Image (cartoon, helix red, strand yellow):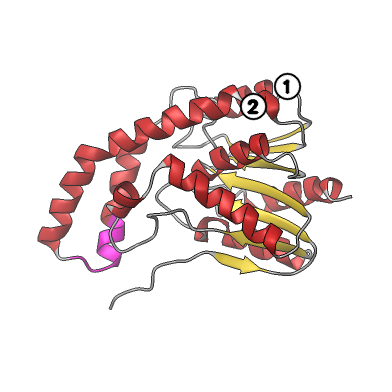
Amino acid sequence: MQQTPIKSFFFEHGPKAVILLHAFASGPVDVRMLARHLEHDDYTVYAPLFTGHMTPDFSDILLQGSPQKWWLDTQRAITFLKDKGFKSISVFGISLGGIFAAKALEEYPELIGGGSLGSPIVRKRQFSVHETFMQMAKANFIRYHTNEVIMNSKLAWLDANIDGLLAKIAAFTAEVADDLPKIKRPYFIGQGLADEIVNPRSAGLLRDQLVNSSVSFHEYPAASHMITVNKAHKQLESDLNSFLTKLYE
């Protein structure tokens, strides 16, 4: 049975607006539990879907997506909330989404703050994103009941081409890292110390380069990469709540 592709979601529940940006090769499901928690505390939450993500064909991430298109998706998310009349907007992202949250805070001084969760903005040696991507691609094709011959052909193509996109993401991220001193609003950093994708030391390097921002820094000792949904999620929600309460005073 064909599954319905995951889309963006918008939970409108108060004048304080939060944008949540998802991870690479995933979708808004990454942040849905966090969004429901924030909605319960009277925040409006918008989580856009990055171009090319969460379709039945994982190849769409490469064929349709790029850092430039995902940056445009982020800009459109900000415009979406502004057009609805929201004045107080913050932006957060997990992993890839954190890169674009930082970019947004660099380029939109009207945003009141934000942050990144498990995000490789300032890079130490990373773990194998290539292998993780290929595992996720295979799982996605199986989920959508892709013919085995077609699946194997597409996986071979992805294996040969994913590194080109990863290089483009790295180049885009380096530009974001160079502009971190432009951020002058409060910034939240959350990092799992058992992260299997992003080197946990990257979080401390990010903190050190936010020289003009008030940083709220949080490490979660036993947590792996997806801290919005794993064993760290309750502590993350509590920490983020405290940060947002001060941010929206």
Q: Quadrant for the N terminus, please.
A: bottom left
Residue type marked 2 = Leu
Disc ID at residue 11: none
Q: Residue at x 52, y 56 (%)?
A: 30
Residue 28 locus on image (x, y percent): 52, 59
Q: In the image shown, does 232 or 168 lie closer to the viewer?
A: 168
Per the image, is 196 magenta?
Answer: no
Which label's residue is closer to the chain start, 1 or 2?
2
Q: Secondary structure at mark 2?
A: helix
> For the residue carrying disc 2, how many other residues have a C-alpha within 10 Å: few (<14), some (14-19), or many (20+)?
many
Q: Residue at x 34, y 73 (%)?
A: 3
Residue type marked 1 = Val
Give the residue furthest to the right: 249
Whether residue 207 is visible, yes or no, is: no
Residue 68 locus on image (x, y percent): 45, 41
Q: Quadrant of residue 11?
A: bottom right
Q: Are marks 1 and 2 in contact (CB under 8 Å)?
A: yes
Disc ID at residue 211: 1
Q: Quadrant of residue 205?
A: top right
Q: Residue at x 30, y 64 (%)?
A: 56
Range drawn in magenta: 139-146
Residue 169 located left or right of residue 165 = right
Q: Which residue position is annotated with label 2?
A: 180
Magenta part, dominant SS:
helix
Disc 1 to disc 2, how far (Cα)?
8 Å
